[in-house]
Structures are given as C-alpha cells and as structure tokens.
Amino acid sequence: MRDPAKLLRSAVARSTRSFAAMSNESIKEREELIAEIVRAFDGVTLGYGITLHEAIAIDDYKTQEERMAARRLDKERQWQDVSAAALLECESALSFLDESGFRYYLPAFMVKGLEDWDKKAGVPVDSCVYHLLHDYPHSLRESEPSTIAAKRGFNDAQCRAIAHFLRFVIGPDDEFPTEDPTTRQAVAKWERFVNERVPAT
C-alpha cells in the first residue's frame, strides 16, 4: 500500500528540515499544533475497532486467536495514553487499521511525530502524511480530501487540525521546498477543502 522509497526520500528531506528549522517560533508553532490536535480528537474512542498490536498481527498474517491475543496488549482507554514505545513498535499499523482504529490512533501518531520533530520524527510522521494524502487505491493526484475525510469520519475540527499538521510537516511553499510538487499540491488541496468546509472564524 505504501511506497517505501518515497517514504524514505520524504523522511530524509524532512529530517534535514527538522534539525535546521526548530527556531523558537517553530517550537511555539509545534506546541500550538499539538494542542490543536489534542482538542480536535479528544473523546475519540476505539469501540470495536482494530487495535494497534492487532493491526501488526494482521500484517503478519496471524491466526484469529493470535490476533485476539495481540488485541489484549492494548489496554489503554484513550488514545492519549498509548505509549511512545507501542507507537514505535507498531509504526506500520496505520496501513492495517479499520476506520475506527485509524481515527483513534491517528492523533497519537501525529502528536508523537511532532514531539520528536527535532529528534527523529521518521516513519510515524511519514505514515500519517501518506495515509492522509492517499485514498487507496487511487493515486496521490486522484485522491480527494473530501473523500478521505468522509471515509475516516473526520469532523470539521479534525479536518482543520489535519490540514495544519500536513502544512507543518512539509513546510512552507517557498523557494526551498523539501517535498515534491505532487505532495505540495495534495497538501494545498487539503487546505482548500478545509477553508471551503470550515471557514476560518
């Protein structure tokens, strides 16, 4: 589902920007973005959705019994309590979650990536970006934020937080972009979608 080569190229470019760009202003922006994500996704529950370790068991073609055993490893009651160790251990989980699981674990991955932005944001951030920009099996160019938001069940506040997250990750559209043009256009589509759906107040 994901292109490892593209993820690697994005991670390298993003790592270069993260180490170079953590000024006091960008640190403040990061903290405000984390707070916005927490507010927007506060109260989101997993219900009967696929859990973090269960997703990895699915990826590994485990039996139903093994899946249930993996599911029991995820004991937290809210996404804010998912441990950093679990997120790193299950960093590919977003590819194998159902819609409830994706909406529940996405903010944990986003916040973890932002907290580690000046260290090693790496795969968690790139996985978030990939799944928020791609409506599988459609290509990046063919994917529409409105369809992605509807499929994942994002509300207005969550859509706005996602658009802000994507812009923070890829950086400004200036003369020294770190991402390829198609990715920048996809993020711009998210921003247009949010501005049309959720006018700024």
Image: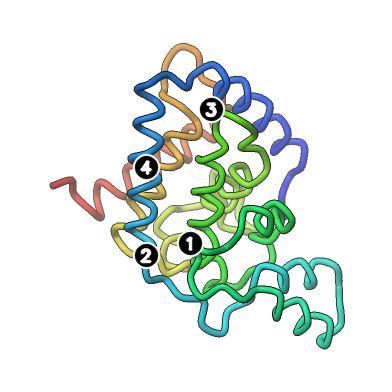
Q: Amino acid at mark 3?
A: Pro
Residue drawn at the location 49% of the way across and 34% of the way down: 169
Q: Which residue is mark 3?
A: 181
> Left or right of 27: which side holds 88?
right
Q: Amino acid at mark 2?
A: Asp
Disc 4 versus disc 3: nearer the observer: 4
Judged from the image, the secondary structure of the residue bearing numbered disc 2 is loop
Judged from the image, the secondary structure of the residue bearing numbered disc 4 is helix
Q: Amino acid at mark 1?
A: Gln
Frontmost residue, 133 versus 92 = 92
Q: Residues within 10 Å of mark 3 (few under 14, many from 20)?
A: few
Q: Which residue is mark 2?
A: 42
Residue drawn at the location 24% of the way across and 50% of the way down: 196
Which of the two discs, 1 and 4, labels the residue nearer the N terminus? Answer: 4
Disc 3 versus disc 1: nearer the observer: 1
> Left or right of 136: which side holds 40?
left
Q: Residues within 10 Å of mark 4 (few under 14, many from 20)?
A: many
Q: Which residue is mark 1?
A: 80
